[in-house]
Each structure stands twice: as C-alpha cells, then as structure tokens.
Amino acid sequence: MKPAAFEYHAPRTVDEALALLDAHGDEAKVLAGGQSLVPMMNMRLARPGVVVDINRLPALDYLTLDGGALRIGALCRQRAVERSALTAEHCPLLRDAVRLIGHLQIRNRGTVVGSIAHADPAAEMTAALTILGGEVTATGPGGERTIDADELFVSYLTTSLDPRELITEARFPVLPAGAGWSWTEIARRHGDFALVGVGVVLSVRAGVVADARIALTGVGPTPVRATHAERALAGAAPGDALWEQAAEAVRAEVEPDDDIHASAAYRRHVAGVLTGRALAEAHGRAREAA
Amino acid sequence: MKLEGTQTLPATVETVWKSINDPETLRRCTPGLKELSETGPDAYAATLTVGIAAVKGTYKGTLTLSEKQPTTHLKIILEGTGGPGFMKGEGIVDLEPQGEGTLVKWTGDVQVGGLMAGVGQRMLGGVGKMLIGQFFKCLEQHLGTDA
Amino acid sequence: MSTRYFGARVTRNEDPALLTGRGLFVDDVRLRGVAHAAVLRSPHANARLLSIDVRQARALRGVLAVYVHADLGTLGDPLPKLIPHPALVHHKTQSALAKDRVRYVGEPVAFVVAESRYIAEDACDRIAVEYDPLPAVASLEAAVGPDAPRVHDDVEGNVCAHYTQRVGDVDAAFARAPHRFRERFVIDRGAASPMETRGVAASWDAGAARLEVWDSTQAPIPIRNGLAQLLGLPEQHVRVVAPDVGGGFGPKVMMFYPEEILVPFAAMRLGRPVKWIEDRREHFVATNQEREQIHDAEIAVDGDGRILGVRTVFLHDAGAYIPYGLIVPIVASTTLPGPYRIPNYHCEFRAVFTNKTMVSPYRGAGRPQGVFVMERLLDRAARELGVDRTEIRRRNLIQPHEFPYDVGLIYQDNAPLRYDSGDYPRCLDRALELIDYAGWPARQRAARAEGRALGCGVACYVEGTGIGPYEGARVTVEPSGQVFVATGVGTQGQGHLTAFAQIAADALGVSPRRVTVHTGDTGMFGWGTGTFASRGATVAGNAVALAAAAVREKTRLVAATLLEAPPEEIELGDGDVFVRGVPARAVTLGEVARAANPLRFAMPREWEGPGLEAIRYFAPPQGAFSNGVHACVVEVDAETGALTVLRYVVVHDCGRVINPSILDGQIRGGVAQGLGGAFYEKLAYDDQAQPLSTTFMDYLLPTAAEVPPVEIGHVETPSPLNPLGIKGAGEAGVIPVIAVIAQAVEDALDPLRLHITEAPLSPNRLRQLIVEARRSP
Amino acid sequence: MAVRKIALRINGKTYTGRAEPRKLLSDFIREDCGLTGTHVGCEHGVCGACTILLDGEAVRSCLLFAVQAEGADLATVEGLADGDRLHPIQQAYQDHHALQCGFCTPGFLMTTLALLRDTPHLTETDIREALAGNLCRCTGYQHIVAAVAAAAAALASGAHPDAYPPFARRVGDSVDPARKERKRNAANDRRTTGAASTRRPRRT
C-alpha cells in the first residue's frame, strides 16, 4: 500500500502556496495533518498529481481569542485545541468534540481546519463549526472571503471551496454566556468515526428555553442542523417531555444512509436518543441567565 | 447496493423521454462523463471519471439503454473497469405525467468492485445518490431552458 | 528432577530484544541487493481470465520481472492438498498464479518484482487484464441454494464434502424425549488479523545450490520439505527460518500460500534476493479466514434437563478452495459435546465452496462454533423448563471419576476422542464463586432499579490440545556452561524461549537465563510439525524435557569420572555438578561438557558419543483435553444497543502450568479476540462476494478501551498422557466468548425474552433484536 | 521521480538519505536509516505499530512522507534503552509480561513515553483511552495497562532524571514533566461526554 508518485512542494509563505494551487487547480491537494489524505494516498484511492505541504507555514499555527470567537489557524493541531485553556474556558463544546477525534497520535498531527476542509459528514469538527455558527476564511486567486458553515459543506467530502482556495483560518464563536452545551456520540470503538454524533447549545432564560442549537453528524451527506427540533424547543419549558419531543423532531428531520456498521433506521432512532441525552446534559450545565 | 429516489422535471413526459435518450444530454449531464461514442442502437462506449474530492477513478466501459417503453419506462446499464476496480450500475427509470411536468421515479442497483468497494464502502451509498442527483439537477436546468 | 523454575512466573528471555527494537521479523531481515515484490490480485469474485498484457508493466523503469501463470511451469500446478479425508471428494486447491479462472477477490493473477515495493505497485497498475465476470456466490445459503452459481464447474451444489459422525441411537432418543428444542445458529466469518501481516523473503546461492527462505510461518519444517520437493532440491540445501513472527493465531500455518512459492521461484530466476511483505488491505483477501457456519441443531432433554440427545446438521463455509482439509468442521463437530454426557449425538456437515478467501483454522478452529451451539441449546432448554442455567449444566457434567471419558467420536488427529483428565464441576463452582453468581439476582434487581440493564453469563467448554504426530528437541551444554535448546516448532509470542528454558533449567540445575532456545529454524532442527492447535508447549515441551533428562544422565555419567563417584550419587545445581552431600567436591557444568569431548585417550563406550547433548522426540498417543468456564457481567444500553463488558472471569484447567504469567497472557489475549468475534469483528461482503471491510477502519479489532480486565482462576488436573502432565492453553481464552456474551445479553434484557442465535452482534443488530422482541410479546 | 536529499536526527544521531517525496517516513526509518525497530502494521493510520515521536509528539510514521521530517528530531524505540539498561518503561513492560509477539510493542512504548511525559498522573481509564490508538492482538491489553501504571509510578518517583532524553521532548519543553503538568490548566476536564459505548467499565 504505497502511494503513487506525485510532485511535492513545501512553500514557505501563504502566497507561495496559493500560487501553487492556482497553477495546478484540482490536480493539487493541500497537505496539512494528512491524517485523512495520506491513508487514501497509501491505498491509491487518491492520486493527486501535486501535493502542496503547508506544514512549513508557521504563521498559520495559532489559536487566539478575538472578538468573541476562537480563531484557529490552518496549522493548529487538534491536540493543541484540545489542551488549550482558551478552548476549555470559552468553548468547552469544541474541546469535548475535538477530544473524540481518532486517537492521540491522530490528534497530534491532524488539524482542525484540515478536518473541516476534508468535510467528512461523520467527523466531529464539521458539526462543531455548524452548531456554533462558525465560519472560515478562504484565500484564493480572488483574495480572501468568509464562508459560513451552512454554505461551506456541500456533500460527502465536498465543500464550496474552489480547488485553488486555501482555508487559512476557522472561527468558532464562544458559547453564549450561561449557555449549557453537550457533545454526545456513539462509536463502535473508542476513536472510531461516530455512527451518530450530536452537539447541543442551550440557553435558558426566565424558566424557558431562550435559544437552542442542535447539529448532528453521521445522518446525512453534510452535518445536519436540526432546525425543526430547535423551533420545538424555543420558548418551551425544559424537562424530559420536551427533550423527547425534540428527539422525535430530529428523527423526522434526518435522512441517514445504510452502511455495514449501522442501518438508516438505527441511525435515525439513535439520533433521537442522543439528542434527548445531549439536551438533558446541556440543560444541567446551563446557568440561568442573569 | 440499492438506491432509489424521485425527481420532478418541468417538462412533458415526451420531452423528458426524448432528452434522456439523446446522447448530447447524457454527455452534458452525466457527472464525469468524458467520452460517449455510439457503438450500436442504444449502445455506447463510455469513459467516465467518477469521484469526489481527492478520490477519483477513471472507468472505461459501456452504456446501454434497454426495456424501452417510450415516455414511460427505460433501463440504463452502465459498466466500466478502471484504476480503483470495476463498476456496474443498473438503473430503472419510470416517468409519469404530473401536472405540467413529469414525475421521475428511479431505482438503481450499483455494484462496485475492487479497491473502491473494500475501502470506500462507508460513503458509496451517499455518493451514488449524490451523483444521480446531479444528473437530474442538470437535466432539470437543461429542460427548464428548452421547454 | 528438582523443579525450581517449572511453575514459576519467570520474566521472559525474549523480552530484552523485542523491547529495544532488536527483534527480527521477516521485514527486518537485511538482504544485500534485495528486490521487492507485489502481487496483482483479481478484483472479481468469479470470472474467466481471458488475457493478461504485461508489456507496459515490464517496460517500467525499475521493474525486474513480471510473472504470470505461463511462466511457472510445474510450479503453476494446483498447490498441495493437505490432510486429505475420505469424505473430502472435491479437494480443490488454487495455483500460485491463476491460470484461466479466478474464484475470489484477491486471487493472485500476476507477480511483479522491482527495485522497490513502490515501483512494483506502480507496475501492477499498468498490467491490463481482461476478465469475463461470472455470477458469484457469497453466502452459504446462496451457495447451496437452487441453481446457485458454481464456484467450481464440476462441483454440484458447491458441496465439496459431506461427513457424519454418530454416537448411540439419536432417532430413538429424540422419539421418546419429553422435551425437544430446535434452533438455527448463524456464525459469521472472522479474520485472525495478527499485527504482523504475512511476509516471505528468499535468497538463492546458485554456486552452492542452496536456498534460504524467511517466512512468517507457524510451521517452517513442512514449508522446507514442500519447497525442496517442488523445486527439486535436497532438503539439506533448503533452509526455512521463521524468525520473530508477529502473531500467528492459525492462518500462518498453511502449505502453501502462493507467495511462499513465488518468492523463492523469483529469487532463483533472478539470482537476486526477493522479499514480499503483505500489506493490510491484501491481508483481508489473501490470508485465510474462518468461523462461518450455519447450524440447524436440536436438543432432547428429560424433565430435569438431563440431555438425552443432541443433533446438528451444519453448513461450513470453505471459501473458494479447500487446501486445509476438513479440520475446522471436524473440530467443531467434536468440540460441541463439551464437558457434558451426551449418550446420543449426531453431527453432520457439508463443506461448501463460496467465492471468498479460503478457510483454515483461526484460533479456536471451529471450537467457538461448536461451544456456541451446545451452550445456546442448554440455555434454551433451561429457559423453557424453568431450570437455572448453571444447574442444567451441573446436572449434565461428566464427573471426575469417569475419566478417561470416551466421547465415541473420532477427533481431528484420527484418534478416538477420549478426554484424558479433568474436574469439570470444580471449574464451574470456582467460576460461579468468582462472579458471585449466588448474589447475582439481587445485584441485577438493584441495577434495574437504577434503570441499568445488567446481565450475567456462564459457559463451559472442553478444548482438544497437544495432538501429535510429534515434536523433537536437541539439548546441548557448551563448555561455557551455556545450555542450548533447539526444536522445530515456530514461535509467535507464546514465550517458548522462556517456557522451554524453564524445563531445561530444572533438569540441568541452571538458571533459565543461561538457556538459549532456538525455534522455527530448519537449519537448527530439521524434524517437526509446527505450532497450532495449542500443541507447542505440550508436545515440544515434553520433547525438551526428555532431551534435557537424557543430558542430565549423560552429565552424571561423565562427571562420575571427574569426581570419582558413581553416577547415581552425582547431583546438578546452580550450574555445578557435585557429589550428593559433598557440595565441595564439585565441577562446573561447563567443565563436564569440556571433559565430555576428549582430545586425547579413549572415550568410554557407555558415553555413546561425545558432548553433553541429546535429541529426543515426543509423540503423544492422542490429544490432551483442557477445559474451563467463562463467566461475565455486561451492561446493555437498550436504546442504542451498545454493550459494555463490566467483568470477565475465566477458570481454566490445563494440567500443570509451566509459567503462570505466560498462561495468563494467552488467556487474556484469547478473550480479547473472542470479544472481537462476539461484538466488533465482521467480514462484510455484498451479494457478489465483493469484500466491503478490508481495512482496520471497517474490520474492528477491540482496543484497550473495549477489552475489560480478565480475572483468572486456575484448577490443575495433570494429564496422564505426558511426562510433564501439561495440556495446551493457547485457544482457551477465545472458545466460549460468543456463547457467554449471548447468554449475558439475554439475561440483561430478560423481560424481553430475547433470542440470540447469531454472532457477532453489533449495536445495530442488537437494537433490531430488541425492537423485534418488543413487537412480538 | 524527483529524489530529494533528506537529513534528520533520530535518537539524537543525524541520518541523511535520498528518497522520493512519496517515500513514507516509516519506510525511510526502516530502510534508509536501518532502524527496523519501528514496525508497520496497516499503513492506514489505525494500528499504531509505526508510532514514533516527531519533535516530541507521538505520531504515526506511516502517515508522514520522509520529506516532511527534514530537519526534525525523531525518537524511535532504539533510543530508549541506555546500552543494556532498559528504560523504566521497558522494564515495566517486561516485569508485567506486557508483550508477547513484540510486533506492536515499539509503538506502545513510544506512545507510553509521550503519554507519561505529558501526563504523569493517570487513572486506568485515562491509560486505556490513551492506548486505544495502538492495537495489540496477543495480550488483551491488561498487562500493558498494568505496565504503564507501574512505569508512571516509577517515573513520578523522580528516581529516573534521564527518563526523557532531549530527542524525546517537545520543542521548547522543560525537562520536568511534573512541573509542566502543574502549569497546564486544571480546567482540562478529565471526563468526556462520550455516549454509551465510550462509557468507562464500572465495577458492579
């Protein structure tokens, strides 16, 4: 299982990287962590003609808090996000989700932005960006542009990026003050892709749900925002009955597929179960807003 | 791998029937179809580059149309071998008039072999549906302008 | 023989090298100028092979050779048929490279040798093969169904063997039985998946006409003998070495895998060393698998749950060819009766071809299937009759006074199936004590009150081990006092280099650290069979004991001349040889070794030759039968179908134990593999026999987060069949796991009266069973 | 086939070689540097047998191209022992029979080295989850978990000041892992919110 030959470039500046992408178009693939791309190259499933290795761009390795959002550079490793005090304090949902990505060795090399660009609908980062209402900065021949999570993920391993564009940064808004959160997933083994993953952010004010955001992985070609369930929650009184109602709404909303590990029916059912559990956990963590 | 779906098209069954039998439409709307040359009645030699993101495979093979019942029913068989193994797809297309337009009910049985089956299994169902969806979306746009 | 190391938890001699990166696995062997090979494999499960165009591949820079069937001459004939059996009428084997037909995805079609594995794989991409795909058959049911596609055109209904064994009058027993319960059991295919894939390297010395082969095999001597015969070389000029092997578990004992022929062939043709290392995706199609069977079984019991008769008719998936005979179905049939008195027993199987990778033993080798059927039938009877599931087992156990117990069947070694020794009730009691079965109902109720579904399972088994034909060993003491042991079995992590050292150390009064053990090298020891069926320690271990005892007597004979005392009064201890009671009158073992090889004067005739060295063989009359009981506590999340194993207990009797740490490791490793086969590992195929799980992302080996700690209790009933009184234990951990997990899951969801008759389960499948059970009260 | 010159340090010693960009780091270490202690079990990033330290981080060497390691500091199993004196982690593995065939052991050792360096105090659950990225088919993991716990105790006792040689430290890391542990934020909550199948085994 050795990769097919390719032309290798290790640009030292972002501009140099962009010039390479511009020159080679969809023949070129960007290599950051490589934890998804290299296995596919080893299996000769992916045979990019040109590999643009951005690991020599230290300028892209940063994790900062700015303007109510965590700004994560394209080269910031998942493990750094997992262990950072900033993430724990301002976005514990992101920490809980990152921590369940693959294994230690994967997270030491894998990047948050790389996982987002790869757009595997079963991957935690796609849902985390979606549920927090995050966005990315894509830089390409036409300069920089911002893409919201909702417009970024198109389908399996497919984003709205132009092949000549590079995501240089992802922004994860911090949790609203007092909001409760939960990331709950079920995977066959510790570290596997989740069969179903659910992220919840819940704000409570004056005894009712002020704002609820729910996103799921593993139940469609992209991360799924459970808008019907969110509407069912808005303004309602928290409690098990409400969580079950939201679970039913999620089951109606998702369009999962079959695969050898789980049927669509299983994923639909479990999507509801995990939503109910995630809402309960998020509610337990929510502090009545002042 | 069984797939199915429905699609409404803004054109009469006659127009839809004509377009899906027309090589020109197939060339334009079949995702990744590089070459399509007629080799006989309702039979074509085809070169298809299928794939998503970094995962691409070029398949050389044949496309045949059969069980033709004009304006109502058609069977499409697409076979090809290539880098990541081989692919065999059988599609049944049924057309029904629906108001101004046409309701298309399609079922597909796609058999993928070799590397793609053994490794890409997790996404094959979804990718298959996506590619067929792209075909119908292109057809819809194409019919929308002509009708 | 003063035993000081036998039975001790000696830390292992092999560890320092393995811990410091100085292990020597096949891929680590340094061969100057070695060329690398890759195999082009069929992407079709059933197809005619019309043409192969290798011109573009041969033209690629760095490619040294591309071989197809036509290039192989007689080496292209069908590979040897192992372990023939009268009932195996269609003993089909594949060729090293497919001639005109491929019958499973992965069957070798071309063999490329190049300067690097990278270039060899590039060349494979450039070989154009024209196939005429044929309908393929994936499942057992499809294979025997009406007008099923034929895997082999001349084999009607794809059945290659039909064999029955009977004890007593089964029909009469069932006719008069007050209670009869029938079940259909489906056990899915699994892969041993050792961490090291297979590998072969070979170098040919044309001048001396000598061939050296490194092979990740569990049986180097049969490979050496087979290669010598096929290549027309004297056995003395062929050396096969199984260096460190990264786990075997069964599939690495095979004669031959195609690459074991192709690599030496290419090395001889090119006059350059050649190495082929299987990659993981290849391993999922090119290395034998096992487990797939469908049993239609029935049990007849009286009102108290005493077994009157058992009957099973099953289909055994053989894969596309059947090189390894009927070992697995025969072992399944003969393991099924287990520790129970079954007066009337009928076991009938059909071995069936399917368009999938070949089948040969994988740790357990049919035993997990047999035990699953028996234990599940007993659970069904217990539930129907309202008898406690441990009580129904106790009532049918063979009692200690009944040994040797003749089961009335013929075992895999063609000898009568006769249990040599055991104490089955004591093992059951010990297991129930460890899992606290008495307190279980209360604990289960308490958990249920908290909304947690906890279940307990108990399963018993008997394991045939230590079968013949034989193993041998040579023990030598060098003038340095260092002891050397050489034997023909291969080692794949079982700690032979320590266990055999302990045996020799006790005989010669030295520390095991002073004993160097060589296994798996036909150049060091050329007679033997191999490591499989939990026979390494039992058969080779006893050969070492016999040889070491002989060297002990020779030492006393020679030392008598040095110490002027009769041999009977000479003792060995702490590296010295001394007169009993007069430790001061002593010489070192090395001095005796030097004296045993005189340069001058006459050598006493009774020495029967120079040196402190002896070769002995041990040929057990029949297998030694270990037994044991597993018990576990599981938690089931009924909403998601997730399973967590909270406690796992194994009580095991394998006679006397050479090294308890090594035994614990074998059991705990076996349980982990068993858990994989119970809940995680499933080889998925589509209906055209295309494999869908050929990576570790889809074929799920349990990790450290899934395997619970295993508590172990030992019972020791020595075997009367060999001097050391030991029995095998290599497969004990894996055998009853699917049975005990099924019972525990049913117990956890008791109100639902779940009905589990398949393995492996999964969250998805468990959830389906729960939904079905809730729908049909 | 543009071949490139590659220079890197392994276990403190400099190695240079020439390789195509596609040559995997695992192959480069084994074939070009002759260090065959690192083993290859799957080449698709799951089994962990190929785990080494790259600039102090435990990574899968089969998912990196050798050219990417140009100028880096690698640590492999061959760098652990000091002549015949085993590293405390290696000694714990032997004492607890934490290996059988030994093929996966180098990967486990390097994962354990980085783990204990970064988090000296671990529960059994922490150890099992941290080791979930290394597959073993022989041992059933129990003895490995025990060995890691024993090694953690031995190293925390401070009796082994040289336990983390320079090539096994993260760039800019201090020597004393315990001091770094205190420096890291305590808010890093140990409990994860994983659903049933990632729940920890509990005694009943």
Image: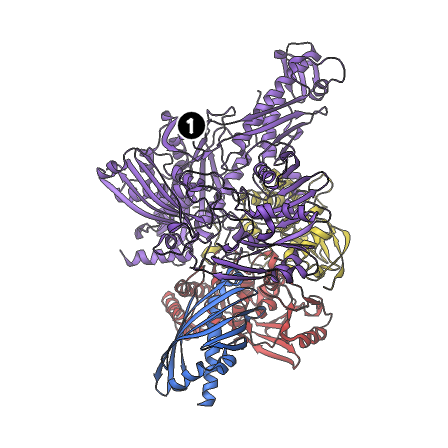
Chain colours: A red, B blue, C purple, D yellow
Q: Is residue C461 visible?
A: yes
* Crowd class of label 1 (few under 14; some 14 to 19; many from 20; radius 10 Å): many
Quarter of the C terminus of chain C within the rendering: bottom left
Q: What x and y, as percent, mark residue C120? A: 65, 57
Q: Is residue D98 above or below residue C277?
A: above
Quarter of the N terminus of chain C within the rendering: top right
Q: What x and y, as percent, mark residue C417? A: 40, 31
Q: What x and y, as percent, mark residue A33? A: 63, 63
Q: Quadrant of residue A257?
A: bottom left
- Residue visible at 58% across and 27% down in the picture: C544
Q: What x and y, as percent, mark residue C64? A: 68, 55
Q: Is residue C308 above or below residue C69?
A: above
Q: Chain of mark 1?
A: C
Residue A131 located left or right of residue C311 = right
Q: Is residue A288 visible?
A: no
Q: Quadrant of residue D42?
A: bottom right
Which one is in front, D109 or C625? C625
Return the residue at label 1: C420
At label 1, the amino acid type is Asp
Determine whether the residue tagged by mark 1 lies in a helix, strand or loop.
loop
Which one is in front, D180 or D98? D98
- Residue visible at 45% across and 79% down in the picture: B136
Which one is in front, C347 or C25? C347
Residue A217 located left or right of residue C567 = left
